[in-house]
Amino acid sequence: MKPQHLITLTSTAVFSLLGTALLWGIWMTGQLRTADNALLDLTQQYLPPDPVDDSPLVYIKIGDISDQPWPWQSLDYAILTHSILRYFPQTLAMETPFYRTDDGPTVYDSQFRNQLRRLNRSLVSVPLTSTGHHLGTAMPLRPFATVPENPAMPGYSHGLWPISEVGDASGLHPQTYPADHDGRIRRIPLLINYQGKPVASQVLTTYATYLGADLASSGAVLGDAIILKDKAAEIIETIPINEKGEITLRFYPELPLRKEVEFYSVILASEQAQQGESPPFDLGVFRNSLVMLGKEHPNIMEPVVTPQGLSSPSRLQLQALANLLNGTYIKDIPFTLMALAIYLTLAASILISRVTHPLLSLAGTLGFLFYVAAMVAMLFYFKGYWIQPTALLIAPALGWIAGRSWIPLIQSKFS
């Protein structure tokens, strides 16, 4: 090999490595990440709607509180759960926490607990905070087996715990909604760092419960996937996650729900059916369903910001569940593969730029740029993989500059 060619290849390898470190460092500051998120939001608007099979999701919302002062007593929830029990829902997830507003337990709390025990597969959300104090009596959360065992993800130390009667009868699982640099929520955690240990979020637990998975037998490799298994340790499903235990949501313009109904409309319809009257909707929608109970009224819920605008936390959970049920979530490329892609793009751009004629060199670099953009778009459109595109699209320009200016300078010094 000629010394000049050896210098070119060595310089290409070194500049590609330095360029990868530079672009990744800029991305970590949040500047390129903001551009990537804007591209992700824009791209999602032009994706065709995915065909959705019969959805098991039923949403019971608390959107009307005009007839009953908030917060509601446990009796209301006991009546609701009794109303749907006879239709055998498969899973009931309640985003609404249940805090005690009086000095002690009431008979209504006991009735609510009994109804939850009859449901057998009920889950209650535990909002977490990183500072402050516990509200209510803290209860243990089962750690979820991960590799590595000590996750490098945001940690939480305090929870807003429900009344003990609910905790005794239901699975308690946390849910958080971390926002990106621009304040919008695009990713939702399936694993959460609580007091230094990873635990399953309510979204993951709800989905796993619906599938019949056993979280004690399941595990995860952060930056790779969550592996859901049954009690016999047979794999039920594998869910790709990033290094923080999150999935990137593909937002449905309209949630694929089997039914959306007001809280008291369910109770009224059940009473009418028991009296032999015709209810306003078919209560059979609850059979084998995955039911979410959540708050919608602006006075009792704090909305979160998504690329689609303001949303209630329960609707965000429904988006995540719909993604999991239909496999439409966006798969993030692992850090190592992303760094390798940037490195190879830089190296190829530098070598293409070494074409003798400047115009041919520029044309080759532009052609390679369009090729990279097309590959990013095809991976996203057909396979659901999101490669952070900004760094990859900057890399050909950076490679062209290095190939046309810096490498000739090095060659002249060593020739």
Image (tube, rainbow, N blue to C red):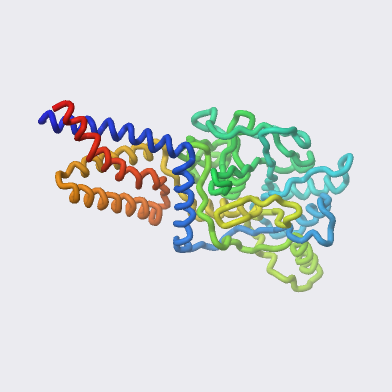
Percent of width and height locating residue 31: 47, 42
**Which residue appears at 69% of the width and 47% of the height?**
120
Percent of width and height locating residue 252: 54, 59
Task: Decide: is 39 above or below 141.
Answer: below
**Does residue 12 appear to the left or right of 326 in the view shown?**
left
Task: Decide: is 374 above or below 273.
Answer: above
Q: Choose top left, top right, bottom left or bottom right for residue 198.
A: top right
**Which residue appears at 63% of the width and 55% of the height?**
311
**Which residue appears at 75% of the width and 52% of the height?**
300
**Does residue 358 appear to the left or right of 62 in the view shown?**
left
Q: Is residue 85 visible?
A: no
**Does residue 322 appear to the left or right of 113 in the view shown?**
left
Q: Choose top left, top right, bottom left or bottom right for residue 273.
A: bottom right
The quadrant of the picture occupied by the C terminus is top left
Q: Residue furthest bottom?
A: 278
The quadrant of the picture occupied by the N terminus is top left
Task: Decide: is 287 above or below 246.
Answer: below
**Which residue appears at 84% of the width and 61% of the height?**
67
Percent of width and height locating residue 233: 51, 38
Q: Residue furthest left?
A: 2
**Does residue 5 appear to the left or right of 403 in the view shown?**
left
Q: Is residue 415 visible?
A: yes
Count of labels in the image: 0
Task: Tell which of 22 and 192 is nearer to you.
Answer: 22
Task: Tell which of 336 and 214 is nearer to you.
Answer: 336
Q: Choose top left, top right, bottom left or bottom right for residue 32.
A: top left
